[in-house]
Amino acid sequence: MYRVMNEFLAKVNLKLDERFAQKADLFLADQPEVKKYCINVNYNKYVVDVHLAKFSVEAADEIFCALARVVRFPYSQMSLRYNEGNCVRYRFVTCSETKEAVYMDVILS
């Protein structure tokens, strides 16, 4: 799956989208399970660090899936999950019909 994700990323034009970041910010600010969060930019991708009030893999998955539904483009999306002990990391990319894509690395702990 990692190879598929990397090939997909090679075929699209990654860019930053302020509306994308605003949607993520509004969503996370409204979640009672989220204790604190931070959205940073690293080159042409967003890094979203989310601290949950009560961490579990299931809670992290629910928050990520809901966040992805809010920020995704309707054309295409792909995500991968890594379990790393007491945190879960997701790689997420969503693409429009014009092959303009937004990439997000989400860390939930």
Image (cartoon, grey):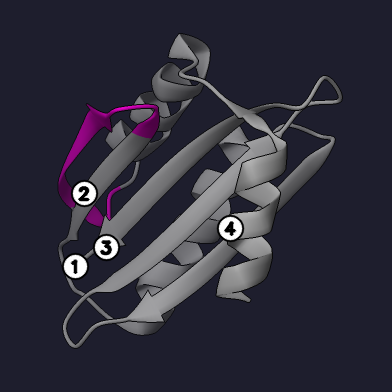
Disc 1 element: loop
Is there CB contact under 8 Å for labels 1 and 2? yes
Task: Depth check: give the residue in front, 72 or 15.
Answer: 15
Using a 10 Å C-alpha cutoff, classify the residue at mark 2 as few (fewer than 14 neighbours), some (14 to 19) or many (20 or more). Answer: some
What numbered label is drawn on residue 6? 4
For the point 46% across and 18% down, the residue is 16
Q: Position of residue 96 (x, y in %)?
A: 77, 26
- The answer for how far apart the CA atoms under marks 3 and 1 are is 4 Å
Amino acid type, mark 3:
Leu
Q: Which residue is mark 2?
A: 49
Q: Secondary structure at mark 4?
A: helix
Q: Is residue 71 magenta?
A: no
Image location of residue 42, percent across then percent down: 25, 32
Q: Are marks 3 and 1 in contact (CB under 8 Å)?
A: yes
In this view, 64 is above or below 72: below
Gap in angstroms between the C-alphas marked 3 and 2: 6 Å
Q: Are marks 4 and 2 in contact (CB under 8 Å)?
A: no
Whether residue 61 sits left or right of residue 76 in the image: it is left
Mark 2 lies on a secondary structure that is: strand
